[in-house]
Image (spheres, grey):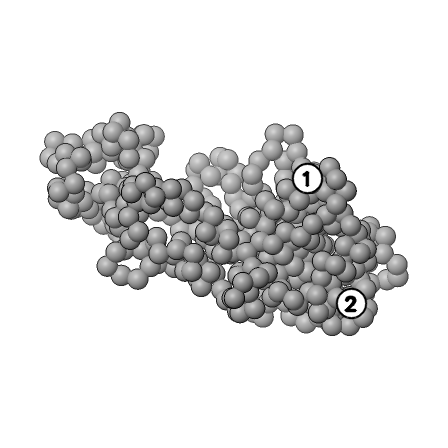
Amino acid sequence: MTAATQRAEGPLAGTRVVELAGIGPGPFAAMLLADLGADVVRVDRPGEAWPGLDPATDLTNRNKRSIRADLKTADGVRLALDLAERADVLIEGYRPGVAERLGVGPDACHARNPRLVYGRMTGWGQDGPLAPRAGHDLAYVALTGALHLAGPAAGPPAAPANLLGDYAGGALYLVVGVLAALHHAGATGRGQVVDAAIVDGAAHLTTLLHGLLAADLWQDRREANLLDGSVPYYAVYPTADGGHMAVAALEPAFYAEFVRLLGIADEAPDRADQDRWPELRALIAARFASRDRAAWTEVFAGSDACVTPVLSLREAAAHPHLTARGTFARADGVTQPAPAPRFSATPGSLRRGPARPGADADEITRDWGLTGPRQETS
């Protein structure tokens, strides 16, 4: 990274965040705050953070600094509370009650810093029958109805990696809550607890569909609705080389462009005739299967047919549009998504690579005004 990049500040410059180390949505939420300029200090536990994962490639720890503390000891708790006293935000992702038992729960932190925004990231939430139970992304989205939406009607629902639950329903909702609570704290001088549960966020993402369901405009089953693959001109098709093309030609004008470029304008049945949709789907599929993905990508390039190739993670980083926008960046030899969203006056930046556990102890001690040296503990 260049010196200019390291000096760049985002809209959250001057905001101090303490992250009590965990995995998944909590670190991602803290990364997003760090990307936007916040000074994020990650309190790592002694020992290996994530077995088998080199800290240098744990991109969710980029733009952060790390200090180690054993929260099962008095010294570790003291350090965490000292940091909380100086912070604007604290993020933890323990099961309900764990932070309290350790001595770093909301009451203990607010006693030291009444303005603190205390962000809690869990799957099931802080209360309810399942609150104390273990879980993972797939279990959370399954219970909310969100998982039921994905996949073909004839088979089981398709697991959408952990993007829908952990990150969309979890981390992003935690960030929204933290930013709203920061606004409130700035206006009133009072902090509060943000209870961000993946089940709440994932359920909230389905708001539009619940409205359509109530209006009898959505069927509560897969491949039976406008946006779930049942419509032949809003679906994914394989190409001759095993690739795929995504078709989203919903509006009549876009559809007309689609069938023209696909070469089936003269033989395609009326798209409004749902009884002939199987025929239309078969016709579209046969055409896509006749050429490889690169050829079809060239055919639809520059058109309003709303057809795009389905790219892998590595391919996406090299796409001309995403390259032109700088959607992906390369830092310290690693290709990664650039900070988002974008700001005209205070852009986020990649200021430093992933924090190595405990490596920034002395720097944090100095910058945060802590007392005494904080040496790295293995």
Q: Is residue 266 above or below residue 224?
A: above
Residue at x-position 51% and y-position 53%: 200
Q: Which residue is mark 1?
A: 183
Residue at x-position 13% and y-position 42%: 275
Is 184 placed left or right of 326 in the picture?
right
- The reply to whether residue 69 is visible in this rendering is no
Q: Give how far across and how far down residue 202 sits, in percent.
A: 47, 52
Give the secondary structure at mark 1.
Answer: helix
Q: Which mark is residue 136?
A: none
Is 336 placed left or right of 279 in the picture?
right
Give the number of the mark in front: 1 or 2: 1
Q: Nearer the viewer, residue 279 or 326?
A: 279
- The reply to whether residue 369 is visible in this rendering is yes
Q: Nearer the viewer, residue 21 or 112?
A: 112
Q: Nearer the viewer, residue 13 or 55?
A: 13
Q: Quadrant of the C terminus?
A: bottom right
Q: How many marks?
A: 2
Q: Is residue 101 above or below residue 336?
A: below
Label 2 CA crowd tier, 10 Å (few <14, some 14–19, many 20+) = some
Q: Quadrant of the N terminus?
A: top right
The amino acid type found where label 1 is placed reads: His
1 or 2: tag closer to the N-terminus: 2
Q: Residue furthest top?
A: 253
Residue at x-position 49% and y-position 56%: 199
Q: Which residue is mark 2?
A: 76
Q: Is residue 160 above or below residue 376?
A: above
Q: Give how far across and how far down residue 291 sits, in percent.
A: 22, 45
